[in-house]
Image: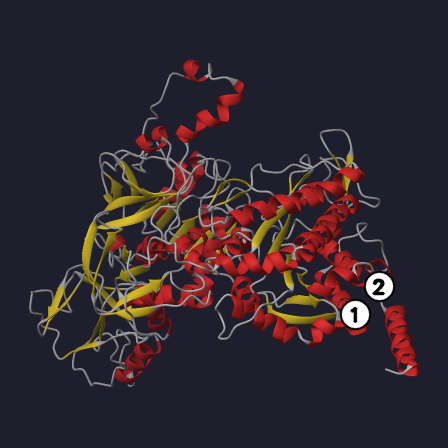
Amino acid sequence: MNRFLVFVLLLSQISTFAQLKAPSDFLGYEIGTEFSRHADVVLYFEHVASNSDMVTYESYGTTNERRPLTYAVVSTPENLRNIEKIRTDNLKQIGIEEGTANPKIAIVWLSYNVHGNEASSTEAAMVTLHKLITEKQDWLRNTVVIIDPCINPDGRDRYANWYNQVKATPYNPKQVATEHNEPWPGGRSNHYYFDLNRDWAWATQVESKQRLKIYNRWMPHIHVDFHEQGINEPYYFAPAAEPYHEVISNWQREFQTAIGKNHAKYFDKEGWLFFTRERFDLLYPSYGDTYPTFMGAIGMTYEQAGHGRAGLGINTDEGYELTLIDRVAHHVTTGLSTVEISSQNADRLNTEFKKYFNNSNLKYKSYVLTGHPDKIKSLTQLLDLHNIEYGFTNSKVSGYSFTSNLNTTLNSRGALVVPTNQPKGKMVKVLFEQDAKLDEPLTYDITAWSVPYAYGLNCVASTTAVEMNAANPSVKELNQVVLASAGYIAPWNSLYDASFLVALLDAKIKVRFSEKDLSFNGQKFKKGSLIITKSDNRSNEQFDETVTKMANLFGRKLYPASTSFSDNGTDFGSPDVKLISPKRIAVLKGEGTSSLNYGSIWHFFEAQLQYPITSIDTDYFSVNQLENFDVLIMPSGWYSNLMGDNQLDDLKEWIRKGGKVIAMGSAMNTFANKDGFNLKKNDSEGDDENEENLIPYDQRERARVKDLITGSIYEVTLDNSHPMAFGYDNNYYSLKLGSSSYQFLESGYNVGYIKDDAKSVSGFSGEDAKAKLKNSLVFGETRMGSGSVIYMVDDVLFRSFWENGKLFLVNSIFFVNNNKFRI
């Protein structure tokens, strides 16, 4: 290359850097003295990408509130010119793409601000980006850094906008100041109040779905999830606390320690406190550290003191002021330190990453699942999100049954097969195993999540690789328009059926359901089946065409009935075949309610069922507002300030007139031991309190384990003749999040219950907590005049991933005590 050309290129590079601005210069304020709006963060990343040949910046989607989800790819110009080869070589070495490769480039992914009010990290992302390309270019010669500056833009802006509105000028560091006390629901969650750091594996939210598409295209070697914690904890970084899931390799453990020691070098130099190996474990698979770990990466959480309380500065309990400037500096330091040590170990990272994807030592080679085709379909949609391979089989399969807990032979005609002899085989094990190995019961989250139970499917784990093919044998054929003289019958088994019902009601098609088993023309139908009669819809001239078109749209099989005269005595006109009225649903929200439980309800109706609800804030709720509603849903929460004796009397009067209350989780405490509600708590049994108080100080936390249920799956007996349980078998596997226990209803209906000793099939339960569940209610209905109160002890919508619970809520709304039809 001649000297003149070198001079031109050098001059061009100098000119580019002259145009490139540091974050403070671009935004007009020192980073850490203001909370940046998400739009301004995007503008800064666009500015850097436009003025540096070391950065590309793209959008991978949008949030519910239409904010962009973005990521930057940072490396040397040469690496960026070859970036597609670097990406695909990484996938080739682990078998996700065809071909062979021996890459030497480390891929590091830095994720910021998954919790919106842990807002220092997005500020740190801008500083980290600038320092990488202006001060740390040498690290990038063998490293690609991917930066997602804000995983949760909606939550971040909710927090930042609130803080910018209420803060004093200058800021007030006193803990009691308004700017340190967020109103409900806070900025932690996304638009639907979901915790995105619990959604990586379940991908129920748009942010997660869109992020996974990009993540699985890259499969990084290192992933860091930047967080904040309480104002009095200094800083946490790897290595993680126990328990570690057993699929985590020795290398993953060792390199976490190496990374932690590298961070410690910088923190010790600055005199910054930190802690490691406490609190934050690596078990539950849906975190921003565990999901990448189970995908072969070194997945880590970094936690800075601050959270939504800290604002621009706050006085800690230890007598010093914690500032946003300090918080940003700490996150920048660990982010850069991570890139540094990754660059130093790029070859080893690739070698060990490749080794992780050897799954020959996994005990179970195939998970074989049977059940209703709709539930199989829902599960395959989850697998598709993670690019997990699966197929179907018609052969008999021998293995360990999750239902009988015995080795058995399964007639697996049309069964779903999910093998572990695939690149993501370890993630398959984590998601599908019946009960994760647990060396330490004190964990940060739930200890049970087994996908077969969550989706209501039978599962056999086989130690042999089951032959499979890609064809799904249960693909439904389209219905043809039949001019049925009486009407149509549609079975009731899943949320797909519920969506079909909602669409029919929205189209002004009148629908009935049966409280008894049906038989027409030799075809049998279970309780809950939908009946769409020509008699009810005489005014609709396109009745047959409309119903058939909608059934095909939702993939529902219709059974035309030539006559309404049944085989078994329950005709279309039977009193047990009841007309379904569109329900007017109110849901309480606001102070006193769980924002997470409310958010799951809101998301369920709006994004999944697509049925309208009216949310009413507890700040202005009164019972007389229910005059124009049929159903009141009370999310888990604490309602003592809202439901005094007078309000309860008014509520009972509304129920007697035909209203329906659905009390979920801790909302049931509102009615426990109250006159007319037929609900009593089980008496607690345990050791004498004085004896408990003799436990030594350093053993108290461990001693409390016996009183804990840290997310465990229990077998529940169902009365599936009750409308609340239509579409279910006579047992159900429920995810219990605690030991709350209520007596069987003395009157009314015990729809789901634990009889005698409780049977846990997965997860940790302390012995005393488990004992409290003996002879306890799980789901029930009590009548009050013309109305009902429905009790749900367990969360049927938990994080929206417990798919098999959702139909209980639909049944409760449309089927339970359906004695009146509203025109």
Which is more N-terminal, label 1 or label 2? 2
For residue 587, side relative to residue 17 (left or right) = left
Q: Which residue is mark 2?
A: 26
Q: Which residue is mark 1?
A: 47
- Report x, y in % for residue 218: 58, 67
Q: Distance from label 2 to label 1 (Cα)?
A: 9 Å
Going by the numbered disc 2, the residue's amino acid type is Phe
Q: Nearer the viewer, residue 435 or 519?
A: 435
Is disc 2 surrounded by few (<14), some (14 to 19) or many (20+) residues within 10 Å? some
Q: Quadrant of residue 389?
A: bottom left
The N terminus is located in which quarter?
A: bottom right
- Residue 263 in sight here: yes
- Report x, y in % for residue 412: 21, 64
Q: Nearer the viewer, residue 740 or 350?
A: 350
Which label was assigned to residue 414? none
Q: Nearer the viewer, residue 643 or 270?
A: 270
Mark 2 in CB contact with mark 1 (< 8 angstroms)? yes
